[in-house]
DNA sequence: CAAATTGATGTCAGCTTCTGACATCAACCG
DNA sequence: CGGTTGATGTCAGAAGCTGACATCAATTTG
């Protein structure tokens, strides 16, 4: 018999999602989230650096996942091909999280502070990507630019995928977006 | 004779830059900024929505500038050519702000919250760019992707330009970055 | 097995950010 | 001249966040 209910962190995440969805991010206090999870405000801040972080539990694992995917990517002469491999891997990661992604996107879309934090998470992924590309011998500014391109495609694809009524696989949407990107960047 | 010293907003911006540079963003309270500017904390918040905004006074004019630049860009079949024209215009805008850009970049680089806000400002520019491209008949997702590409190039170029010892014109650095981007995106 | 340690949580005090409500008073307008 | 306007000040208070210390079941140690 343990002293506390297990999975405090998960309970906080769940409580936060519920409350944010019900009445919005600003109209919810940290004390209320903690209360619904059967904990105190102070404990919330032991699990999350600030109020927004509770909505981005996947950020760290996803970054690690990116780093791994890029290390495992097959050799390719062109940076964007490496990016393509990472996007494929990322698609698999999200494959079974579509409902969660959708719900979270709705909450985030309703609040500027949360969008701000989402940009940070994406920027972190960009940095991981760039670092991985540099690790594969790609120089600057090519690595940074290819990484930015990858994240841009990722972002666009993720939004489209979550928004679509039909259930396509994310991988397909990602590849489509990447193709569109290549067409945009083509010299003519 | 006016009742108050003129240019309260400018004084707040200057005071904030000084204090942030001296002892850092977190170690400076809004009351201190206002005090150095000869005002009160409450007045600070009448000029800036929050503590970070004081460091981004150019954001709105720059957005308007982007919108104008994109409307004025010459007809071009390829989205990225329109983006190139906007980058040229943006380069002119920053031409005589190099020292300010440098000082601000140093302050921003030292604090995560400020980097977060900077991402928002860039995202706003991306949105303006995308909207302008759509207004020129470019569809989705091409408009969004081209806009992301433009902002990425802009970001990379601005950092390089401010960091360089020699005094090149920003326009040159931007064009170089755009070329690098095209090379990255090329299929081989 | 008793004692010491650990670790997740609670309690409390306090600072800072940010906002609403109301007051002030020079400049301006009719 | 009297009324209005607008930038500022004053005050109170909610909420975010942090440091310091207490608690106590579980675990480890001797």
Image (cartoon, coloured by chain):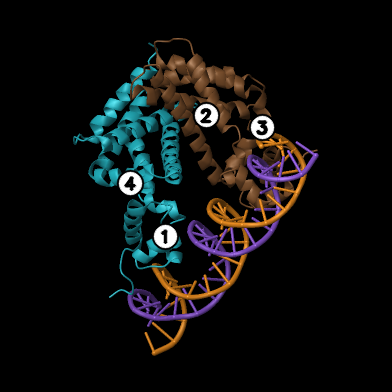
Chain colours: A brown, B cyan, C purple, D orange
Q: Is residue B68 visible?
A: yes
The Cα–Cα distance between marks 2 and 4, rounded to whole angstroms, is: 28 Å
Asked whether C13 or B176 is in front, the reply is: C13
Which of the numbered marks, if any, corresponds to residue B115?
A: none
Callout 3: residue from which chain? A
What residue is pinned by disc 3?
A: A100
> In the image, is residue A153 above or below residue B128?
above
Looking at the rendered image, the disc whose residue lies closer to the viewer, 3 or 4, is 4
Identify whether D26 is placed above or below C20.
Answer: above
Q: CA distance from mark 1 to mark 4?
A: 19 Å
> Neighbour class for label 3 at 10 Å: few (<14), some, many (≥20)?
few
Question: Which residue was labeled with disc 1?
Answer: B47
Can the viewer see residue B143?
A: no
Which part of the image, by quadrant, shows the N terminus of chain B? bottom left
Q: Position of residue A122 (x, y in %)?
A: 50, 32
Is residue A66 placed above or below A14 in the rendered structure?
A: above
Q: Are marks 3 and 4 on the same chain?
A: no
The chain holding disc 4 is B
Query: Which residue bears the numbered disc 2?
Result: A155
Q: Which residue is mark 4?
A: B104
Count residues near mark 4 (Cα–Cα under 10 Å), then give few for <14, some for 14-19, many for 20+.
Answer: some
Residue depth check, mark 1 versus mark 4: number of the one nearer the observer: 4
Name the N-terminal-most of marks 1 and 4. 1
Q: How many marks?
A: 4
Q: Using the rendered image, report if marks 1 and 3 lie on a common chain.
A: no
């Amino acid at each position: 018999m343990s002293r506390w209910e297990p999975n405090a962190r998960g309970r906080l995440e769940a409580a936060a999602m519920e409350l944010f969805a019900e009445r919005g991010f600003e109209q919810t206090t940290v004390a209320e989230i903690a209360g619904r999870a059967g904990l105190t405000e102070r404990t919330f801040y032991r699990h999350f650096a600030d109020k927004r972080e509770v909505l981005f539990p996947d950020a760290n694992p996803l970054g690690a996942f990116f780093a791994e995917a890029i290390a495992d990517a097959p050799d390719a002469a062109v940076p964007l091909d490496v990016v393509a491999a990472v996007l494929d891997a990322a698609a698999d990661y999200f494959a079974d999280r579509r409902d969660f992604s959708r719900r979270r996107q709705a909450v985030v879309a309703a609040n500027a502070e949360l969008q701000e934090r989402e940009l940070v998470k994406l920027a972190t992924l960009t940095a991981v990507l760039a670092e991985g590309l540099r690790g594969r011998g790609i120089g600057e500014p090519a690595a940074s630019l290819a990484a930015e391109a990858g994240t841009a495609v990722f972002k666009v694809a993720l939004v489209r995928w979550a928004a679509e009524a039909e259930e396509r696989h994310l991988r397909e949407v990602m590849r489509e977006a990447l193709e569109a990107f290549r067409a945009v960047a083509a010299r003519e």
